Structure formats: structure tokens, C-alpha cells
Image: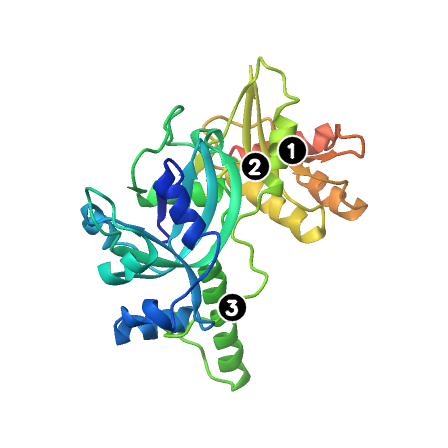
Amino acid sequence: MTQVVIQPSYGNRDAWRHWEDTLDKEVPFSDGLHAETLSAQEQVALAALHPTGRARFWGATGNHDSKMDGLQTGDIVLFTGQKLVRAIGEVGYSFRNAEFADTLWEPQAERGSYRNVYSLLNFQVTSIPYEEIWDLPGFSVGDNFMGLRFLDPEKSATVLAGLRIYPETEAQQAAEQDRLIARELGTGTVVATEAVNVTHTNYERLMGTTLVHRAEALLVAAYRATLDSTATVGRIRTPAGVTDLYVSDGDRVEIIEAKRSAHHRHVREALGQLLDYVAHAPHPASRLTALFPHRPGTADLDLLHRYGVDCLYRTGTGTFQRLSAPDAQRELLQSIWTS
């Protein structure tokens, strides 16, 4: 299970300087003073994850030792400050080394060295307002995320789904599973379920993997701004994930799923997610809607309408156009949605 960590990192001059020194740029760790302070084990572990000999780093002081003991490769860190998630990173190698930390950052006056060090496999600068997290189920409006915070499994899953974070480590593991199955099937060998759960000492970076997708969130925000102020608009958490929008207006309940593309694959994904969400909705839904940045093709529109799902898309003028499923088809499918 991928753990999410909230790391305040932009609240004072020290944090700004640390950001500038070890997040804005990669640090060479394989030679010079940095290398001299690393143990042989640490050098091997870092080189396996960062074969270029360079990486971004962050750290925490000794008062966070017990928390930092639980940090693992692939965990996701939200770097926060000034009411924004300013960047999202994926943890590489986590280790405790005060001497190495002191080559990166000057020790804190009261708490000492930032000895709980971790590298970052993937780092993406963002500008996500806290309101997007407050809007997620389980979070509170006005929470300014003071202090290092490790989220529990439920909240971690909510943040990953709600902010559309796709860890590169998970993509790498999925690719490795695919290669393993293809190799085994190619030899005619039956693949045991356990054979897919393989760990590796070397990390193969997947070029082009995106850590977090923002297009869908911006599309949802643009559509949300057009909704009637009398409607109750939010998001709900279901066993199937977190909805993009859950709109309640009197007896009318609408579940909306947004996609960054209107291509066939994304249309199918939206349809599947909507049918999964509606089965767990707290109140019977009267409308399911797939939201896209452009108009889908005719065949994909027919696919949505066949299952009673509306299509909503952004026009060239910036307005939103709804293509509703036939009433008879929606009413027929509602008996299945709510059964």
C-alpha cells in the first residue's frame, strides 16, 4: 500500500534554501564530499535507484525518527507551503545519516541535523490549492497541514485517487509483472499467482511516466464553477474510489467522472468507474455523467448512452455541452444502478 506523507517545506527561509539546494536541482552523490559520508551499503542502494549518480533529496530532524522509520520506496510526499501543494515526489531510498545530511543542509539550531534523509525517484512541481484536499472525504476545511504528517491507509488512498497521483514505482511493478507473465507464457509454463509478486534490487526508470495528472482536476473545477449555487457539490469516497463530483439538488443526485481525453480508452474507463461508483452511492443516483475536454466520437457516445450515461464536454468557446442519454434508456438502467 502506497503511503502518503504531507511535508511542510516552504514556510521559512531555511525551508526555501533547502528547496533551492536539493529539490530545485539534483545533487551529485557518487563523488566528492557527499560520497565520502555515505556507507558502502548506502552508495549501492542509491546507485541502484539513481544510476546517474544524482538525485533530489529531502530530510527530517531526529525528533521524527520513529515516523521516518516507516518511510518506504514508492511512498508519495506532498511538499506543502503557503496553502499550496507545491510539489509531489516519490520516495527513492530512505536512510539515516547525519554526516551526509550535513553536507546537504546546515543543521537546525534547536533540533540538529536533518539526519532522516530520502532521495526522490520522481519529482513534479505543482500548484494544488489546499481546497482540493479539503474537498476530499475525511479531510477538514481550514486544515493547514502543520508539521510532518503520515496519512493512514484510508486517507492515503483517498489522496492518491482524489489528486490523480500515479506513482512511477507502481507503473514499474506493473510493467515487470507484464514482462514476467509474457515470458512464462511464451515458454508454455503455467504461471503461478505467487510468481508475479517479485521484488528487484535494481530500479528500471520508466521514461515519460507522469506522477500526477492535473488536466482532469482543472476540467472539473471549470465545470463546477458553472453549477447552480443552490446545489450541494462535493466528492464521496466509495469502495471503488473517490468520485470527481457528487451533485445533490433536491431529489436529483448526479455522479460525474472526468477524463483528460475523449479517446475510446478514456470513455471506457469513465463508463466503468461510473458503474462502479453508483453501486456504492449513499443515495440512489438519478444521473451518471462522463465529463470530457472534447466531444467523443459517435461510437463512444453511443456506448455511454447504451448504459444510460450522459456525456458532458467542453466546447471551443469554453462552455459545456450536455448530450443526454435517452430517458427510456436511463430509466431502464437505473433499476440496475440501484439494485
Amino acid type shown at disc 2: Ile
Mark identifier at residue 336: 2
Look at the numbered disc 1 and give the secondary structure of its residue: helix
* Comes first in the chain, label 3 or label 1: 3
Mark identifier at residue 175: 3
Number of other residues with Cα within 10 Å of mark 3, as a class: few under 14, some 14 to 19, many 20 or more: few
Is residue 286 found left or right of 140 in the rendered image? Answer: right
Tell me the distance, in whole angstroms, between the alpha carbons under discs 2 and 3.
Answer: 35 Å
Residue under circle 1?
A: 332
Question: Viewer-proximal residue, 258 or 141?
Answer: 141
Q: Residue at x 52, y 75 (%)?
A: 179
Amino acid type shown at disc 1: Leu
Look at the numbered disc 2 and give the secondary structure of its residue: helix
Question: Viewer-proximal residue, 120 or 4?
Answer: 120
Is residue 13 found left or right of 266 in the rendered image? Answer: left
Q: Is residue 250 above or below residue 173?
A: above
Residue 238: image location, x then y, percent: 44, 38
Residue 177: image location, x then y, percent: 47, 70
* Comes first in the chain, label 2 or label 3: 3
Amino acid type shown at disc 3: Ala
Tell me the distance, in whole angstroms, between the alpha carbons under discs 1 and 2.
Answer: 8 Å
Image quadrant containing the N terminus: bottom left
Tell me the distance, in whole angstroms, between the alpha carbons under discs 3 and 1.
Answer: 40 Å
Here the colouring is rainbow
Number of other residues with Cα within 10 Å of mark 2, as a class: few under 14, some 14 to 19, many 20 or more: few
Callout 3 touching callout 1 (CB < 8 Å): no
Tell me the mark number nearer the camera, choosing from 3 and 1.
3
Callout 1 touching callout 2 (CB < 8 Å): yes
